Image: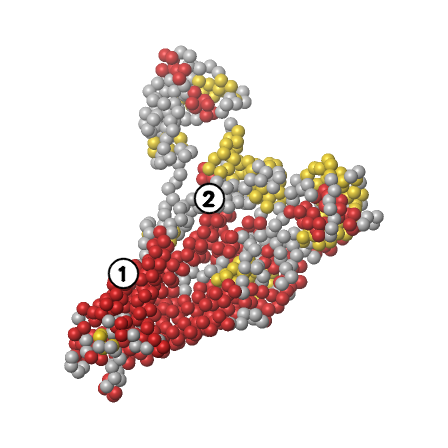
Amino acid sequence: MKTDPICGMQVDEQTALSATRDDEVFFFCSESCREKFGSGAKGGKGDCGDDQAAASSGCGGRNGGHSHHASADVKPSAAAKYFCPMCEGVTSDKPGSCPKCGMVLERNPAWKAERKVIYTCPMHPQIEQDHPGNCPICGMTLELKAPAADAPEDDSELRDMTRRLWIGGLLALPVFVVAMLHVIPALGHLEWANRDWSRWGQFLLATPVVLWAGAPFFVRGWRSIVTWHLNMFTLIAIGVGAAYVYSVAAMLAPGLFPPSTDMGGKVGIYFEAAAVIIVLVLLGQVLELRARSRTGSAIKALLNLAPPTARLITEKGDEEVSLDRVKVGDRLRVVPGDKVPVDGVVLEGRSNVEESMITGEPLPVEKKAGDKVTGGTVNGTGSFVVRAERVGSDSMLGQIVAMVAEAQRSRAPIQGLADRVGGIFVPFVVGASVLTFIIWILVGPEPRLAHAIVNAVAVLIIACPCALGLATPMSIMVGVGRGAQEGVLVKSAESLERLEKVTTLVIDKTGTLTEGKPRLMDTLPADGFEAKELLLLAASLEQSSEHPLAAAIVRGAADQGISPTAVSDFRSVTAGGVAGKVGERSVLVGKTAFLRQEGVGGLEPLETIAAKLQEAGKTAMFVAVDGKPAGVIAVADPIKESTPEAIRELHELGLKIVMLTGDNRRTADAVAKTLGLDAVEAEVEPDGKVSKVKDLRSAGEHVAMAGDGINDAPALSEAEVGIAMGTGTDVAMQSAGITLVKGDLRGIGKAIRLSRATLGNIRQNLFFAFVYNLVGVPIAAGVLYPFTGTLLSPMIAGAAMSLSSVSVITNALRLRHARLTK
């Protein structure tokens, strides 16, 4: 008996199918197994021509399947992890043997592991559940912990809140206008505004705003009370609820209220306060949801960098498979122009790979056998075979995604400040209101109950969180608008808050300090050649090349008014250079090794020149004409014109500047020396940048990170403030809290001044709001009544509340004239 090498089944070598490979004979239970063994194998005896023998051996005769099998070509559903290729319906979640035929179960190529969906709170990451909902601690909407590239974007809550905002705003506007007419002296006393039909109209318009548009806030407020995690929604629910219930009672039972509550012969109502507060809170929720959806798109953009498929090398040839089928050890082919599917090692072939995703550098890197490649990077003109070493979440791209997601989840939103205040303020206000009610019931003048209700409600209304709620968002709103005028786009309010305290700026080189695009810097001819002649010959040859350095030479020639001429016999040598004929002259451009390989000697003087250029951070290319050294052409990524001034300004603002770059040490040191930076780290990968940011923060520094590349995204998210160049990648901009539209570093100085002005304004607003509450609540409770006989009616409480809001808004508007330049 022999063992089938495919399924492990014992077969009779006298009757079984067979195939020969490398002079060795293998035996099979069926034609299906022999086909799986490989088309290159040679068929032999036991072709099952004898049906009786086939039956006795378990082979299905000429049909090529077991005699009892319903089908020899079973196609299982994607839900089955393992299946029997011969028996219909036999599947399993674990490896094993078929209970019908004993054949070893095969792994289903169509099977995909079900991704466990977890929702978490961005403010309280310990909260996790397998379905959408709200955080039981702070009331925020839960978000996906690990979004997938193919996951549909759920914007149902954003659409719902937007709908509530528009409808609520349209209904609240006439209520607000009518209620505020009495505070405009020029209009005089409008009696119709206080008539019954006007009051009932305000009731009918405000009711859907409060009970429908504001329903989510009452639900969250109630949950916060039940769980005793008091937050801003507690304040909103109590304040709006008190104003609305008081106003409804005033409409339905005005006789319960004392004369002090009269306004024009009728009890005062506060529907406009309840409706406007709901609309303002809805506006804040919509803005927050939009910001969070943009944050999630950063991770999706990263996930989409990986190609959806890979070319798997099998015994039958290349097979295109989905990326999730690639396993460690698989051999994959990468053809010109393709993205590298996974992290691995080059086994054969060579090419130039554009690794700006990882290093941030625009120049391709030569890859040959033994070199490592990273998934998501882009292959150049060559082809190579790579062995998969890290796949899925273990890959460099997977780790970048995880780092960005983790850093983004670790951030608390600006609402955290209001929640912390609410945790102290809410019990105080509720306690003050209850205490007011009790005191007036026990020792107050008649009618005691009416006075107790009115004063308790006055406490709740005057302590309504409108001013407290506006203190931060109004300053942020004006500050963000002021920044936009100066080309500083603020994505999150917290970034603006944290920027004020920054002490260290970690900065990327390519595209941030420099232009991010190679440019022709020097044309140095050898004896017997002119600079223009040298540039003409090199540009003529390089116009046929796809290399970024070639494009820089061609652009540089065009800038000098040199038009390339026709080239013949052009050829490109991967990682070496280019060759061809320009007119009657044979021209070579590339590395010294390439020129020597082509028979060019006497390059030592040019190598001396090139060494000095390289010390200045430039890339040198050698040119030979008709077999003789003709000169050196230098290309570099030049420092932006605005960078030196920006660095000086940031130093004056007290910041320490550290450069982190994936570029080589020589180039990094040259740039750092030119600009006078405080520290520099070269040849740093994305995880290295994250580690450096963490180290700085651990040392007590408040760190901001400025960058423009995909490789900067994790560090931008890890830093307390991420600043992206508007000229950079979408992923960098989505991972950062602040974007400089023009990619001009001077914008960082503007952003810091804006942050300091805005935070100062917020502190002033909070001071106004707190002083107002500290003074207003005791007066509303009736503390002056024993001395002056003064009672503060809810009408006056509402006016005081409005005045506090006006003071906050007026102060915030001063930011429109804040000076952001030196």
Residue 403, compared with residue 587, is above or below; it is below
Residue 145: % across, % down:
39, 52
Looking at the image, residue 341 lies above or below residue 413: above
Residue nearer the viewer, 396 or 463: 463
Residue 813 locus on image (x, y percent) = 45, 71
Check disc 2 and report the residue beneath it.
392
Crowd rating for badge 1 (residues with CA inside 10 Å; few <14, some 14–19, many 20+): some
Residue in view at x 64 percent, y 64 percent: 644
The amino acid pointed to by label 2 is: Gly
Relative horizontal placement of residue 729, taking residue 365 as reference (left or right): left
Binning the other alpha carbons within 10 Å of mark 2 as few (below 14), some (14 to 19) or many (20 upward) gives some
Residue that label 1 marks: 208
Work out how far the residue at label 2 is from the one at label 1, CA to CA, in angstroms: 50 Å
Residue 807, relative to residue 709: is it above or below? Answer: below
Q: Residue at x 32, y 73 (%)?
A: 181
Q: Residue at x 52, y 63 (%)?
A: 488
* Numbered disc 1: secondary structure: helix
371 left or right, relative to 323: right
Residue 318 vertical position relative to residue 484 in the rendered view, above or below: above
Q: Amino acid at mark 1?
A: Pro
Marks counted in the figure total 2
- Residue 383 location, quadrant: top right
Picture disc at residue 721: none
In what element is the residue under mark 2? helix
In the picture, the quarter occupied by the N terminus is top left
Q: Position of residue 14 (x, y in %)?
A: 43, 14
